[in-house]
Image (cartoon, helix red, strand yellow):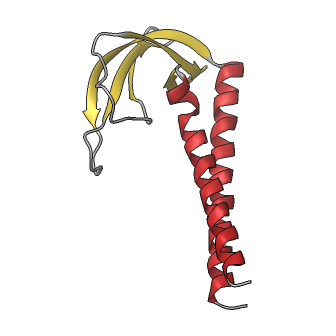
Amino acid sequence: MGDVSVWAWVCVGWSVLLAGVGCREFGRVRRLRRDGIVTRGVIVGERPVPDVDVKAYSPVVAYRDERGVEVRFTQVTHGSGPRPVIGREVDVIRLPGQPESARIMRWRHMSGQGVVMLVGAAVFLGGAYLIATQNN
């Protein structure tokens, strides 16, 4: 049980952590799809994402909740692709009474984070396998 085994276990630990976060994210998306309210929103602005090497932007979306109050949120998922089109209407899904749970109803914004976490978990698990089999 040398250093190689310790690093393999560290990779397994990170893999389990990332898989857990990915599964939690998919659970949130499942709940949104099951219990969520779909409404129309408008992209009213964009925010540059700090601390990244490339220019990335997150759309700022405004919609009206069940009481008619305007709610604005910044989408967590962002990309370095084309900038969000201001004034574009988008479908927004949220849980009843929880405006902070709102997301743009597109695959990238709904499932993207979960997929990234599960891919990261697979990469760490593969790294653990390579480390464990390297000295055997």
- Residue 82 spot, x, y in % from top left: 30, 25
Q: Nearer the viewer, residue 25 or 63?
A: 25
The N terminus appears in which quarter of the rendering? bottom right
- Residue 42: which quarter of the image? top left
Residue 110: give x, y in percent of width and height: 56, 28
Q: Position of residue 37 (x, y in %)?
A: 60, 14
Q: Is residue 39 left or right of residue 131?
A: left
Rendered view: 134 above or below 40: below
Occupied quadrant, residue 134: bottom right
- Residue at 71% over, 76% down: 133
Counting from the top left corner in percent of width and height, residue 96 is at: 61, 19
Q: Residue at x 63, y 47 (%)?
A: 118
Q: Quadrant of the C terminus?
A: bottom right
Please indicate whether residue 26 sits to the left or right of residue 52 in the image.
right
Q: Please tell me which residue is depicted at 27% across the width and 27% down the height of the picture.
A: 46
Residue 68 visible in the current orientation: yes
Image height of 16 relative to 29, above or below: below
